[in-house]
């Protein structure tokens, strides 16, 4: 993925929730997910796989008849993923089930994707510190839909944050044995 800078709303930067940070790369600010948990409080950040120098977000993924681990780019709007299996999208389509690698709890919740052209009504839910603030990632493989729900930040500002996405979504998927 080529990191392309998108403006992060000042209102968001002034009220950054715990678990999200912004870092400077090539003199530009990027939003990076620093710490997310399953709803039971298991840390999902993995040091074994770093993407763009940052910890990745690790969970189990079930796609059709296939299942394995995925490591997701922690850069907000970056969608690079590293799989240790080949997702089987041919049998049941691109909607996935996501599970906490520690407790096996499903992380799927009902949430209508706001991405134009996407009909998914399910999302993978990541909890930020304290389990109040949440990050929702569309459960349709390949869809860049994602949003944050942060208590003290207005819906309008959060919508602007949701629109931060980078190009090259599919080109960044990597498959390897780990
Ligand atoms: Zn868990
Ligand atoms: Zn979607």
Image (cartoon, helix red, strand yellow):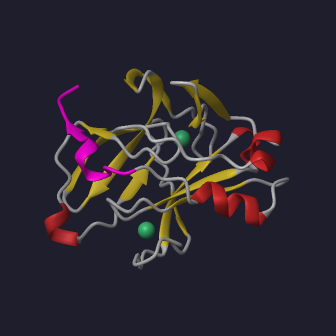
Question: In the image, what residue occupies the spot 41% across and 53% down?
Answer: 98
Give the image location of residue 32, x and y in percent.
57, 35
Number of on-image labels = 0
Q: Given the current orientation, which residue lies at the most extreme right position? A: 152
Give the image location of residue 102, x and y in percent.
47, 35
Q: Given the current orientation, which residue lies at the most extreme front position? A: 27
Query: On the rendered image, what quadrant is the N terminus found in?
Result: top left
Magenta part of the protein: which range?
167-178
Q: Is residue 164 left or right of residue 169?
A: right
**Ligand 1 quadrant?**
top right
Question: In the image, what residue occupies the spot 24% across and 70% down?
Answer: 93
**Image quadrant assignment for residue 27:** top right
Question: In the image, what residue occupies the spot 23% across and 36% down?
Answer: 84
Taking depth in this image into account, of 16 and 26 the one nearest to the observer is 26
Give the image location of residue 89, x and y in percent.
19, 63
Is 140 located above or below residue 5 in the figure? below
Q: Is residue 159 magenta?
A: no
Q: Is residue 158 left or right of residue 176?
A: right
Question: In the image, what residue occupies the spot 28% across and 66% down?
Answer: 94
Query: On the rendered image, what quadrant is the C terminus found in?
Result: top left
Q: Is residue 172 magenta?
A: yes
Give the image location of residue 118, x and y in percent.
41, 75
Is 82 located above or below residue 99 in the figure? above
């Amino acid at each position: 993925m080529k990191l392309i800078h998108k403006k992060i709303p000042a209102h968001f930067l002034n009220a950054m929730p715990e678990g999200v940070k912004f870092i400077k790369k090539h003199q530009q600010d990027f939003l990076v997910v620093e710490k997310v948990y399953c709803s039971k409080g298991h840390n999902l950040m993995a040091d074994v796989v770093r993407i763009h120098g940052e910890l990745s977000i690790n969970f189990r993924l079930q796609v059709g008849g296939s299942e394995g681990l995925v490591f997701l780019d922690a850069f907000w709007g970056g969608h690079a993923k590293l799989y240790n299996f080949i997702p089987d999208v041919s049998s049941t389509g691109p909607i996935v089930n996501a599970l906490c690698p520690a407790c096996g709890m499903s992380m799927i919740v009902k949430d209508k994707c706001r991405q134009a052209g996407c009909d998914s009504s399910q999302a993978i839910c990541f909890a930020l510190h304290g389990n109040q603030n949440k990050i929702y990632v569309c459960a349709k493989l390949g869809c860049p839909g994602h949003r944050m729900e942060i208590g003290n930040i207005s819906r309008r500002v959060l919508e602007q944050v949701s629109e931060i996405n980078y190009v090259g979504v599919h080109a960044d998927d990597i498959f390897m044995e780990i």
